[in-house]
Image (cartoon, rainbow, N blue to C red):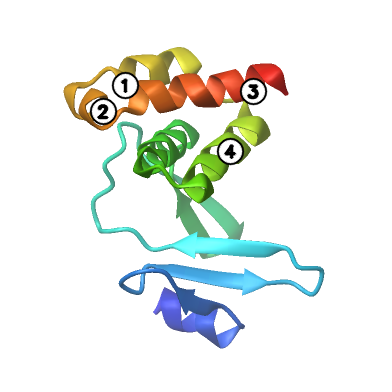
Amino acid sequence: SDREVLVGIGFRWGGVGHRHLSYEFGDGEIVLVEFPASELDGIRPPTWHELRPGIGVWVIALDDLMMDRLQQATDGTVVTMDAAVDLARAAATDIDWAGLELEAQSPGNRRIGVPDILRAVRSQLDRA
């Protein structure tokens, strides 16, 4: 399986429910891989990126990843807020901010405070 291959080349399990793998390079850089449930909650379909002939990965759409980080940041921990801000900084020009604003206003996202988190992330970007 994909998971066994990654473990075989040095990835390690972490996180909850055997969904997350990480690989740490000699310089300290870490690559994280998540095996989400078979159904993704995102609005946009993931895209296939071929790494070499016959081998590739499905990648979640950037805006769905940003929304996921915003939703996780509602738990109040610095770590998840930092992850949302880091992603926003790295991909600011590629993110559909207007689309995220609309999505943040859905009843479920409003209930957990996503609009406030989105404003806080945008505020940190503006200050940077």
Q: Is residue 58 visible?
A: yes
Which is nearer the eye, 121 or 44?
121
**Relative to 112, is 30 on the left or the right?**
right
Task: Say if 125 sits above or below 35 in the image.
Answer: above
Mark toward the viewer: 4 or 3: 3
Q: Residues within 10 Å of mark 1 (few under 14, many from 20)?
A: some
Task: Say if 69 sits above or below 100 in the image.
Answer: below
Mark toward the viewer: 1 or 3: 3
Mark 1 lies on residue: 103
For residue 125, the mark is: 3
Residue 75 drawn at (x, y percent): 35, 44
Q: Is residue 48 visible?
A: no
Amino acid at the residue labelled 1: Glu
Q: Residues within 10 Å of mark 4 (few under 14, many from 20)?
A: some
Residue 32 drawn at (x, y percent): 55, 62
Q: Secondary structure at mark 1?
A: helix
Cβ–Cβ under 8 Å for marks 1 and 2: yes
For residue 109, the mark is: 2
Residue 115 drawn at (x, y percent): 36, 21
Mark 4 lies on residue: 87
Distance from disc 1 to disc 2, alpha carbons, whole Å, reads 8 Å
Residue at left 34%, top 69%? Answer: 16
Of the residues under marks 1 and 3, which one precedes in the sequence? 1
Amino acid at the residue labelled 3: Leu
Residue at left 61%, top 83%? Answer: 9
Amino acid at the residue labelled 4: Leu
Mark toward the viewer: 1 or 2: 2
